[in-house]
Every structure is written in structure tokens, then in C-alpha cells.
């Protein structure tokens, strides 16, 4: 039976640990929660699970919030700090103690170590059976430190009815009395999660399948408190293309990496939701459609495989569908986050295509040797004017799969004279090419309208008059104008550069 608020609308949460970046698997979990809430008029809450103060990293909190904001997954209200709720967690622990559902445990570190060694020797899982469960606390040494353990049932089963995994049964004999309050008075994760979810009115818990055992332990706390258990949905993990758990060796893990590679939020959302959920054979779905169609009951039980090629194809679609103003805005937002030195230092997998941001870093090093960071590059575009970039986008976006590739194709706009020619371009600018450019310059200088069509006509007429093929003329022009042998259509390049800059570059290589 579905659990909802009094209004009949679900309340869900995303609860990351602030120990690092927003992992792509966490981003998908957040997306699933967000879609479920949005599609049913519910609430999507954010909680930072920072009970472990030694591992808490304020910079990681900022990165998580930044990643969610970039993905355009807006949350309701202010983010909740789990650590700030610690007094409430202690209150519940004391309530469980007073009601007989928990007990003080005086097991020492040495005794626990003996239990671990015995379990290892017998090759069995460690299940703590504390003798203090039924002993009189008065027998404890005066002033001895203690933890508070849940008095979990020893007989029968704990059932987790999961909307994705189905009915999962845990034998109570295999679940020990978990610690809910440490000897220093700090609450443990499982207690804090239950109390926070209850107090926040969470109706549905959607999270990774690695939390399934926690669901059994948390169910026992819910039952001991007499609280309603939320609807569980434990989603499968994301694997790499090779079937192994997604890790650094598969490429990017954090959402910020996908931003720096030039993926659009709408494309990443579309791709992530398809990792474990489907709507018939639909591959490309608008955010509005996802909100309308998504349901946790349709999440697949099996793990999904992350395929960069599919993401690239999807992102290319959204780039082509995006307007110029939108692509300029996204590019300006992305560029300062590029770290060319870090990208250049990343190991290259010879079996995988070169990441677009890594390829961009190499291109920048070759074309713009003085540019060391994304901020430096952004300054170049600011100085030259983003209007040139905007004018180039219609011809650039047809071939670009990412914003990084869009930028790479536009580097000629901010290159300084004399242009650094790559090896292939340098070979093209031979004596014959220099003579050809020199012969063409008067016609270009006389062009009354500096448009792509007028420039093409001028070059075409010159080629016919001299008996040359258009391609034989266009290729040296491209090399002289961009320093490369691959670029947008050469006449578009000339038009975007403008009369003064284009002619100056051609004169640099004219005989």
C-alpha cells in the first residue's frame, strides 16, 4: 500500500554524505526522487548526512549543492544538516532505552576483538551477541563507558517490501543488536536516518540497492518506535561498459566532470533516467514527459551499464536542438570550470575514445600556448567578443557532440596572429598555396559584402578563372584562417572572423 502525506502527495528526499563530489549514481538517485515528487505534486527534500564529523567536508557539501543546481534538480526548503539534529537523535535513543527496546552495552574493545577473531576462525559472519542484553546494568563497572544498542528481535524475520527488489526477507538471527548511540554520545547512521526521515515526513525512500540491509535494520527501529515504515525502493547500481561497478577507471564519476566535458543538463537527465527505467522504446524524452511518465514501480531490478557513446549521441541531439543564446550561456557557465593542466595529466585509455574535455585541453595547448585555464580562455572570448562565438554556433553545432567540442571548433576565433599551424596545415601552406592565396586576396579585398555566400562566389569565380578546383583553393584558405585542416565551412569561418581579421590572416601566408 502506498504511503503518502495527509494530502495524498509523496515526500521524498536525497541524502548524500558530504565526503566528496556528487557521484553520477547519486545524481541518478536524486533524479528519480525529484521526478517522483514532481510528477505527483509532492515535495523533494535535501538532507546532508554529516553525522561522521571526521569525514565531513564543507567543500564537498558545496560541490553537491552545485551539482544538483547545475542538473536543475531544485529542492524544497533549506537543506537539512543531519548533525544539527543530534539532540533529537539522542532523545529517541533514550526513549528506546526507557521503553525496554534498547539497552546499555558495556562490551569492551578487547571483548569485541575476541568476537571478531572467533568469527574469522570459524569462517562465519560476525554477529554481535552482547551479554549485556539481559544483564542487570548494576553489574557494570562504575563509570565504565557504554553504548546503547537496539534490542532487536532474535526470532522470526524482518520483511522489506521493496517497490523495485520485491519482498526481501532477513532472518532476525542474522541481524545483531546494532549500536544506536556511541559511547561518546553521538548517534549512529541508522538511528539518525530513521529519526530524520520520520520527522521530515518522508513517505518514500528511493536510494541505492547497497542500502537494502540498512532497510531491514531501520525497519526494526521504526517498529520499536511504533512509527510508520516508509515505502522502500532500492535501485540497482550503475556499472561501466565492461559490467564492473562504475569507478574512476571507467572515466568520469562526479557530476562536475560531466559539466566540464560539455554535457547539457537536459541530456544528462535524459540519459540517467534511462539507466534503470524505461518508457516503451522511447530514447529521447523531454523533462516534461519524464515528470509525467516516471514511476518508481517501473525501475528495473538489474544493474545498468553506462555507455558514453549513447550519452554523446543524446547530447549531440540536444545541442542541435538548442538555440544560439542557450548554447552561449551554457558555454560561458562551463568554461571557467575547465582545468587544462589537470585534464592533460589524466591517463588516456587506449581502448576508449579520448574524452572531449581532454581533447580540448590538448587543442588549447597547441593553438593557444599562453592559455593555462578555462578562466584564461573565457577572458580571450570576452576580449574578442562573444558575438563572434554566437555567429559561429550554427555551423559549429552540427558536428559537436559536447560543448567541449563546440569550444574546440571555435578556438580559431580567439587565436592570435601569427596562427600556430598544426602539422597537416603547415604542409598545406606550401609555395603553390601561398601564391594561390596571394592571387585571391585582391578579389576578397574588393568584395562589397562580407557574407559567406558572397565570399564563396568570389572564391569560386577565382578558381574558375585560374582553372583550379574549389577544394584546391578552400583547403589552404582553411589552414591559413584556422591553423587546422578541419573546421566549419571555410566561408562561414571567413564571415565570422570579419573582413579585417580574415584578410590579415590570409596576408600572413600570401606569397
Image (cartoon, helix red, strand yellow):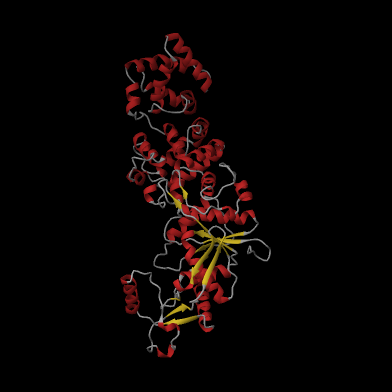
Above or below: residue 66 compared with residue 458: below
Any part of residue 81 in sight = no
Residue 152 in picture, x, y percent from top left = 49, 76
Number of on-image labels = 0
Closer-to-camera residue (116/447) = 116
Position of 138 compared to 224: left or right? left
**Residue located 43% across and 20% down the image:** 474
- The C terminus lies in which quarter of the figure? top left
Residue 394 in picture, x, y percent from top left = 53, 31
Any part of residue 225 in sight = yes
**Residue located 38% across and 32% down the image:** 416
Above or below: residue 285 compared with residue 209: above
Closer-to-camera residue (142/60) = 142
Outermost residue on the right side: it is 7
Q: Residue 123 lies in what quarter of the image? A: bottom left
Above or below: residue 470 compared with residue 403: above
Residue 279 in picture, x, y percent from top left = 59, 46
Above or below: residue 17 compared with residue 249: below
Q: Residue 442 lies in what quarter of the image? A: top left
- The N terminus lies in which quarter of the figure? bottom right
**Residue located 37% across and 37% down the image:** 364
Residue 375 in picture, x, y percent from top left = 42, 44
Amino acid at each position: 500500500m502506498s504511503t503518502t502525506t495527509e494530502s495524498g502527495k509523496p515526500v521524498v528526499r536525497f541524502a548524500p554524505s558530504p565526503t566528496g563530489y556528487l557521484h553520477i549514481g547519486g545524481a541518478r538517485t536524486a533524479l528519480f526522487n525529484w521526478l517522483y515528487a514532481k510528477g505527483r505534486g509532492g515535495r523533494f527534500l535535501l538532507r546532508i548526512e554529516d553525522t561522521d564529523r571526521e569525514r565531513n567536508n564543507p567543500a564537498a557539501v558545496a560541490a553537491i549543492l552545485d551539482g544538483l543546481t547545475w542538473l536543475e534538480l531544485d529542492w524544497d526548503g533549506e537543506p537539512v544538516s543531519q548533525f544539527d539534529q543530534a539532540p533529537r537523535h539522542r532523545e529517541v535513543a533514550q526513549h528506546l532505552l526507557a521503553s525496554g527496546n534498547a539497552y546499555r552495552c558495556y562490551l569492551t574493545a578487547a571483548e569485541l576483538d575476541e568476537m571478531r577473531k572467533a568469527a574469522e576462525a570459524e569462517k562465519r559472519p560476525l554477529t554481535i551477541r552482547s551479554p549485556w542484553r539481559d544483564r542487570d546494568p548494576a553489574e557494570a563497572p562504575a563509570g565504565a563507558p557504554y553504548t546503547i544498542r537496539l534490542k532487536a528481535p532474535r526470532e522470526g524475520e524482518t520483511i522489506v517490501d521493496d517497490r523495485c527488489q520485491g519482498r526481501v526477507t532477513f532472518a532476525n538471527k542474522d541481524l545483531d543488536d546494532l549500536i544506536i548511540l556511541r559511547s561518546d554520545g553521538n548517534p549512529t547512521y541508522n538511528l539518525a536516518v530513521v529519526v530524520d526521515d520520520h520527522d521530515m515526513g518522508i513517505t518514500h525512500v528511493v536510494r541505492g540497492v547497497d542500502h537494502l540491509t540498512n532497510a531491514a535494520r531501520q525497519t526494526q527501529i521504526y517498529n520499536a518506535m511504533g512509527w510508520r515504515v516508509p515505502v522502500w525502493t532500492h535501485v540497482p547500481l550503475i556499472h561501466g561498459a565492461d559490467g564492473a561497478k562504475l569507478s574512476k577507471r571507467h572515466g568520469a564519476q562526479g557530476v562536475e566532470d560531466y559539466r566540464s566535458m560539455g554535457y547539457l543538463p537536459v541530456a544528462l537527465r535524459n540519459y540517467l533516467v534511462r539507466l534503470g527505467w524505461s518508457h516503451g522504446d522511447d530514447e529521447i524524452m523531454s523533462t516534461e514527459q519524464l515528470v509525467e511518465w516516471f514511476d518508481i514501480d517501473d525501475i528495473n531490478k538489474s544493474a545498468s551499464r553506462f555507455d558514453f557513446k549513447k550519452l554523446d549521441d543524446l547530447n549531440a541531439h540536444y545541442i542541435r536542438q538548442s538555440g544560439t543564446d542557450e548554447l552561449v550561456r551554457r558555454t560561458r557557465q562551463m568554461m571557467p570550470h575547465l582545468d587544462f593542466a589537470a585534464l592533460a595529466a589524466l591517463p588516456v585509455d587506449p581502448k576508449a575514445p579520448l574524452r572531449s574535455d581532454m581533447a580540448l585541453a590538448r587543442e588549447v595547448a597547441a593553438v593557444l600556448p599562453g592559455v593555462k585555464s578555462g578562466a584564461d580562455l573565457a577572458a580571450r572570448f570576452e576580449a574578442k567578443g562573444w558575438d563572434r562565438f554566437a555567429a559561429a554556433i550554427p555551423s559549429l553545432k552540427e558536428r559537436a557532440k559536447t560543448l567541449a567540442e563546440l569550444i574546440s571548433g571555435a578556438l580559431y576565433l580567439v587565436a592570435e596572429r601569427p596562427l600556430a599551424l598544426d602539422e597537416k596545415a603547415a604542409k598545406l601552406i606550401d609555395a603553390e598555396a601561398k601564391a594561390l592565396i596571394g592571387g585571391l586576396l585582391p578579389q576578397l579585398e574588393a568584395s562589397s559584402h562580407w557574407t559567406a555566400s558572397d565570399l564563396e562566389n568570389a572564391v569560386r569565380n577565382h578558381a574558375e578563372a585560374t582553372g583550379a578546383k574549389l577544394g584546391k583553393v578552400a583547403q589552404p584558405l582553411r589552414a591559413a584562417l584556422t591553423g587546422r585542416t578541419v573546421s566549419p565551412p571555410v566561408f562561414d569561418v571567413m564571415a565570422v572572423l570579419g573582413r579585417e581579421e580574415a584578410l590579415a590572416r590570409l596576408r600572413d601566408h600570401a606569397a
